[in-house]
Every structure is written in C-alpha cells, then in structure tokens.
Amino acid sequence: MLRSHLALCLITLALTAAPSTGCSRQSEPPAAPSAPAPKPDTAVKATPAATSAKALPSPDAYAGSERCGECHEDEHSAWSQDWHSRALSQATPKFVVGDFRDAHFKGDSSEAWMSRREDRFFMRTLGLDGNLAEYPVQWVVGGKRMQDPVTVTADGRWQVLPVYFHVTGKGEWVDYSEQKQGRLSPDHPFFWANFARSAQHACLDCHTTGLDVRYDRAAHQWATTFADPGVACESCHGPGARHVETQDPKDIVHPKHLPPELGLAVCGQCHGPRRTLFPMLDASHRFRPGRRYEDYYQPMVLLVGGERSGDYFEDGRPSTSSFEYQALTQSQCHMKGGATCLSCHTAPHVEHAPNEIQLPEGAPAGVSAGTATCQGCHPDIFAEGKRHTHHTAPAAQDCIACHMPPIVSGVLDQLLDHTMDVPVPENTVKHGIPNACNACHTHAKQKPEVMAKALARWWPEAKQRQQRRLRLADAFVTKVAAKSRPFLEAVLADPSEAPSLRGAAALYLARRFRQEATPALRSTLGGAKDPLLRSQIVEALGLAKAREAADELVPLMKDPSLWVRQEAILTLAQLGDARALPELEALTRQPETSGLVMPHTLLGHLSLRRKDVPKATREFERAVDLQPYNAELLVLLADIYTAQGNLAKARERLEDAVRFAPKNQGARKRLAALRDR
C-alpha cells in the first residue's frame, strides 16, 4: 500500500509530467459493485416471489422463513427454539436477556446505564463527542453466551453498543472490546460508535439471512435489508422463493445430500473469519449453499492484513472461538478421515444434544453425545476404554477431554478445540501453548514436563503426531523467527499438511526471508492443487519480488480460481511484467470481475506512473464506489484533488476517510492543513 507522502509525490510528478517511481498494491480484501443505494431503511424485507405463472422467481430470490414454515411446520417450530434463530433478534422482552432494570456498568474506558421503559430498552453512555446520551436498543445479537445490544444511528449504521451482557457468566454486563483491545478512546477504531464496530461491517453477514447492505456516498446514508434476522432456513438451504412456487426438490439445497466439501462450506460460511472476494456491498456475489467455499472466501489464518493475528496459538491452532472451520480443516479427522461439521453435528431443526450434536443410536450409558460421535469412526479405540485412556476418572474417559480440550477463548468462556489433535506438553514448555493434559492436571507437581514424560510412556505412537505440532510452532513462533526458515520450508513442502497452514508458511517465508524464500516457493507452486495455497504462494512471490518466477506466473493468469487469477495478474503487474497489463485492464472491464477493488486500485497507480491523472482518478473513484470505507484510497484521492487545486473535493474525501477511520493520521493532518489554507 502506498505511503501517503509517496502517493502525494507520485501525484505531483504526474501532474508536472515528470517520471514517477514504482507502486505497490493495497492489502485490503477486494470488493464488488453495489447498486445505487435506496433511501435508508432498516426494516426486514423478503424478496417477493414472482406472481406470473410463467416467470418463476430467480434462483437467488429469498422467500423468508415464514413461507418455509407453511409447508414445514415441525421443522420451522423446532428451528425457532434453537439459538440459530436468535442470532439476531428485535429488542423485545421476548428476546432481550440482559438486565435493564436500571443497571450500571463502569470500566476503564466505558460507562453505561441500562434502563427499560415499558417494552423498550435503552443504554446511556458516552458518544463520539464525549457527551452522555441515551441510545435506544433496537436489536440484539446472540443471547446463547453473550448478547450484544445494537442501536441504529441517524445515518442508518447499526452500531454495537459498548457493553454486552454475559449470559453464561455471572449474568453481568462486561466490556469485551476493552478486554480484547485495551482502553478505548473515541478516536480508537473499536470505540463503539466508530465504523469498525458497525454491525453491517462485523456482524450481519453471519447473523442474518439474505443480507443486502447499501451505502449512498453522497448522502452518507446506509440502507440494510434482509430476508430474515438470524440464521434462518435459507442460510443453510439456499434462497427458496423458486422452491416455494415449484415445490421441486431440485430448487432447494439439502446440506446432508451435498458432497462433503460443499456441506462443510454451508457451515464454514459463518464458522470461521474469512476474507471475501466480493464483500458486503455486493449482495449478488454472496455465497449461497451448494456452492464452493473457495470461490467466495479465503479463511483468515495467522496473518490478517500482513500482521500476526492474536486469534491463533503459535502452532497454528485457533485460540479464539468462531474459528471452527480453520480448526477442523487442519485436523487429521478432516484431512485423512474426511470429517466435516455434519459428521458430528446436525441441523437446528432436528432433535439433538446441546450445540447441535447428533444423537447417535445405541450410545452406552454415561457416554457424552460428543464422544458417542467419535466411536462412529474410531470403534476400536473406543472399545479399549481405560486401556487407551490410562485414566480412571469418568471425565477422562470422554474423548473430548484429551482431544478437544476447552482451551479456546469464546468471548469470556472457554470452548472446545476443534483441531482434535493429540496433547503436546512440549509446546507448552517451549512456547506457552496450552495442552489438554494441563487443562485438568493443574497441581504444581503436574508440570508440562511431567505430562510429556507420561505421554511418551503411555502413548509412544503419539510422537509422530506431536512432531507435526512441534514443527508448526517452530515455524510460526515470532520470538525465534530468525531460525524459522527450515521449519517453514518443511511445512510448505509437506503435501500432507493443511493447505491453509502451508499457505501461511509461504507468506511467512516471504516476509521473513525475502529472496531466500524464492526457491522453496517456486518448487512448491507447480504441485499446489489447492487454490488457497496457489494464491498465497503467488502473493508470497510478489512479496519476495521474485521476477525470476514471472514465466511460472503467466499461466496462472488463466487459472480456474478467480482468487489465483487476480493474484497472478496483480503480482506480475507489480513486478513490471508487460504481459499482465492487458489482463489487468480486462479484470476492470469484464462484468464478472469489474467489481474487484484491487485491479482498479493497481491500475490507478500504474496510470499515475504513466502521468495519466484523469484515468488514475477514474480508477480510484471507481474503487471507492465499490468500497466506500477504504480510508487509504480516500486519502490518495484527496491528494490528487489537492494537487489539482480542487480543495472542496479533497476536503470531502478526507472527511469521508475520517468518518470511517477516525485514527487515520494522514487524513487528520491533511484536513488540518486544508483548514489552515
């Protein structure tokens, strides 16, 4: 991403017909086009079915859960009692679980007073201006473990208020954001009233069904509609308006009947943070059940925007809940056994144990539902009982105790580790990574070193599995990054390793070792079958500025995966390869790809290098149309307009940048300079 002073230098040089220097592309995920925004509207709307007998509704048209319930009464009734249906609810007495009886909370950076008047709920707290104000609570997110109150602002943003109600804790109000981010001042991105805490940006894609979010740049207004609040029927079965009309089974999706990977994608669309190819303002390019996960998403693994994520342990396992997709896909159960979410879980409308765990038939008395699902794949081990566990306590006979320990942070609760691996106490000793043994054995004499010896004595065959996790930790741990190259190369080259972890290894190699990483990256690229791995190796080659790999990247500009095609074209264009320019132009023009932000952004930078300021301006403005909250692009446009003497437009773009990123110092300094002028 261009630094602000370099961007202004490029603009000035282009305007004065002087030669320019190189550029780098932006790291924010691409976006796709939005239709002109309607008037602000926060009402729930279902897509109407076509009335003509000859014109059936589009396959992408939603019916709404009420229409589903007309034919599927039992399923609809069961679903309505499940927590999925309450992923988002209107703030009515039926759904609000928090204490609003004149309750009070005070933290280091937030203070709030909760109250109720008849059937309406309110929170009084500090706003962006530093003054106390009362905000109506119109919606609540969740309610199973934590419930987040939401207020809708005058510009149509849904803002998550500063304190949440901890349902599964002591039944008290907490400031979870403060616990995760530290003290939050009004200019902090995660202060409750700022864009980063808007529900449209952070919550609604997974907490609604059939979401359609739009933004009017001129009016600075948001409009949000959806088919259903909550995770409703069509979240898992796909848009159903056509099925309502035809009653044809082929017009609806049955996740259990899908191929395993497509069934996994139905759950994975929400159970794992991800980069989106077409982001929130493009409802037409949203994932639909029955489609491939990798055509829409890339799971976030270890690195987010080039920075190390705090949501992972050093060995690559997620340390935070809601990363179940990332955890499961790096497990042996998935990679070797083909397990998916539906191997253990079932639909919300089917009778189930807690957390949608299947109820296996014939499970022995005293065996948890979770362990009972394990015996379906591991009957021999299950039959060994204490001969396998080497423990006598009843809790230790549960497979979950050792292979899915509660070491994952779920808001303020501890949840199960879905990587389903063997305990590795040595990684606790070396890197402070928690292990299953010491989740139970907490006595001072039961140190990780003691647990490691017991493991080696009782389960010597586990050593190979442990070596994998030891290697991953040695590869990714930050404190010994200088010595990590052989471990990263080993992870990258191992075809039996999870593609997501191999991709992370590729990016770490390039970031830590630059040109030294190129041989290992090139040798792996040709055999990389997974599109995530291919695209991340290509990205890593770009980070390493590996011009010698250009001929190997050229064929990837026609790769079946749009992620890979885009990455290959952007990388080659950045490396100055002329073969990429026609493909880059095509990405910005073709209807199926013109909504990708990064091609427009890079083409704008290249146009500045060619001193074509009008084209650069058009491309940057088009990119901001697609992604209006992109503060870096808004600052860059402000620099262009300032250099042209158009101070009014420059001010507009800078004010937009501060609106979405109040801590953007470049925008703030430029605004101050404009005021001084």
Image: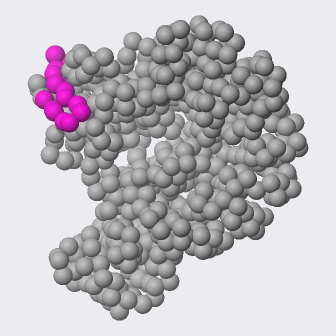
> Residue 616 versus residue 566: which sits nearer the camera?
616
- Residue 306 is situated, as x and y percent measured from the top left of the image, at 55, 48
Position of 77 compared to 288: left or right? left
* Overall secondary structure of the magenta section: strand
Give the quadrant of the N terminus.
top right
Position of 247 compared to 135: left or right? right
Q: In this view, does 631 lie above or below 169?
A: above
The answer to whether residue 375 is magenta is no
> Residue 79 versus residue 158: which sits nearer the camera?
158
- Residue 483 is situated, as x and y percent measured from the top left of the image, at 54, 71
The answer to whether residue 111 is magenta is yes
Residue range in magenta is 104-119
Kindly identify the residue that appears in the image at 53 percent across and 8 percent down. 677
Q: In which quarter of the image is residue 202?
A: top left
Kindly identify the residue that appears in the image at 53 percent across and 61 percent down. 329
Position of 54 compared to 47: left or right? right
